Image (cartoon, coloured by chain):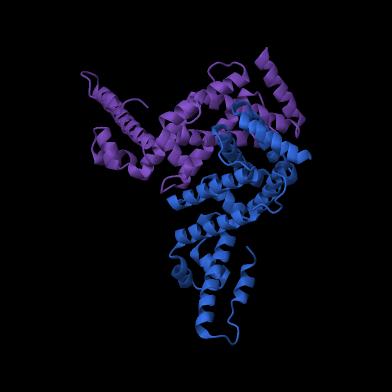
Chain colours: A blue, B purple
Amino acid sequence: MGSTSGAAEQAKPAAGDARPARRRLSVDRRREELMAAALELFSRRDAEDVSIDDVASAAGASRALVYHYFGGKQELYVAALKSAAAQLEARLKPHENGRPLDELAGGLTRYFDFVEEHAAGFAALLRGGPANRSGDIGEIVDSVRNRLFILIMKQMRVEEPGPALRITLRSWIASVETAGLDWLEHRDIERPALERMLVDHMVALLGVAARHDPRVGELLDNLLRDQTS
Amino acid sequence: MGSTSGAAEQAKPAAGDARPARRRLSVDRRREELMAAALELFSRRDAEDVSIDDVASAAGASRALVYHYFGGKQELYVAALKSAAAQLEARLKPHENGRPLDELAGGLTRYFDFVEEHAAGFAALLRGGPANRSGDIGEIVDSVRNRLFILIMKQMRVEEPGPALRITLRSWIASVETAGLDWLEHRDIERPALERMLVDHMVALLGVAARHDPRVGELLDNLLRDQTS
């Protein structure tokens, strides 16, 4: 998310330039700075403990400006959450175009980086949610889960999953989320060990699903062959 | 949850009895009837689509009486959720005191019975939550998860889980929840097959955890020995 004070400095008006373009840029930037400040705060504290004043002061802006851009705290929280979800998805885009299980492992590392950076916000959101959890928020959470599902299907080169594979992948995603929460709470296992365990979970779960759907067996054979070749 | 009209009939004043005792009984019963009606409605519809009037009319009571007992819709929803959580926990108490994996399988069947009976409410709660999801609600959901965790530990005769086992059990509980949501959404796999798959998941996940913690290996050996003896 970057330093908010740094972002505020960048936005100080520079000399020269035609007026309308500069103003437009500065409006977009101002909004981005406020959002970065909000996301930073929502990542470090429970949403209940973040006020509009906190966001304004972190961004070096007025309370009125925050209201002007976002309407209110709930809207600001939803906007920050959307921005965080977009960041997460961007990070999880496969880097290597390599072997599916390596891609999965790489994606998990980046997922846990994200969890760590947004620790308090991630925990508050998924543990039970802030005091005012609107339908919007549930939808954002669900949409992230769905995109992860689609991403993993793509990594595994699966087009149409049967029920056993679909349930297995969705279950695995839920279990990764839970492992993230558990890790934030306890931190009594090394992250690399945890990440390896979760990749191994996937392989083990696909092994179970293969008993219910032979196509999953073929998929798993391919994944493991890719891995050892 | 039983039929609400049946419950309403039972509560009609019977002849005889000393006044104070009867009135007290009837107050408790009236509250229970309202709660049963509320839970029935919250189980079949999204909370947003249930009004105080709906609850009053389902219980054959006045709107004022519902407000009198529960304060408002949010309080009524929280009370209904607590009641549902208590019902679920009561159902999951092991019946047989038998082999741990059989107990797990039996518990899963009763869990899915519950999911099916409270379909809409379960989905709305865990998919993303109703429009007004207060801290209370998150706490109830978390507390159910924690109790399931303790229950499974007890079934498996584990006292102090290490990190690998703790994460594995919590992940499995999350994946069962997700499988429940998926099943409500798709119903394209037979419930017994799904339940078997989830028991197999547990065994497979414990197998992975055993690579990180030898005590989990011993536990798994015991579970499987109990199973085949």
Looking at the rendered image, the quarter that the N terminus of chain A falls into is bottom right
Residue in the image at 60% along x and 58% along y: A87
Q: Residue furthest left?
A: B15
- From this view, report whether residue B199 is shown above or below residue A56: above
In the visual, does A211 lie left or right of B38? right
Q: In the figure, residue B195 lies in which quadrant?
A: top right
Can the viewer see residue B56 in this picture?
Answer: yes
In the visual, does A77 lie left or right of A200? left
Residue in the image at 41% along x and 49% along y: B131
In the visual, does A151 lie left or right of B43? right
Q: Compare residues A197 and A73 and report the one nearer the observer.
A: A197
Q: In the figure, residue B15 lies in which quadrant?
A: top left
Q: Residue furthest right?
A: A229
Percent x, y for residue A119?
Answer: 62, 52
- From this view, report whether residue B76 is shown above or below residue B215: below
Percent x, y for residue A165?
Answer: 58, 35
Q: Compare residues A95 and B108 and report the one nearer the observer.
A: A95
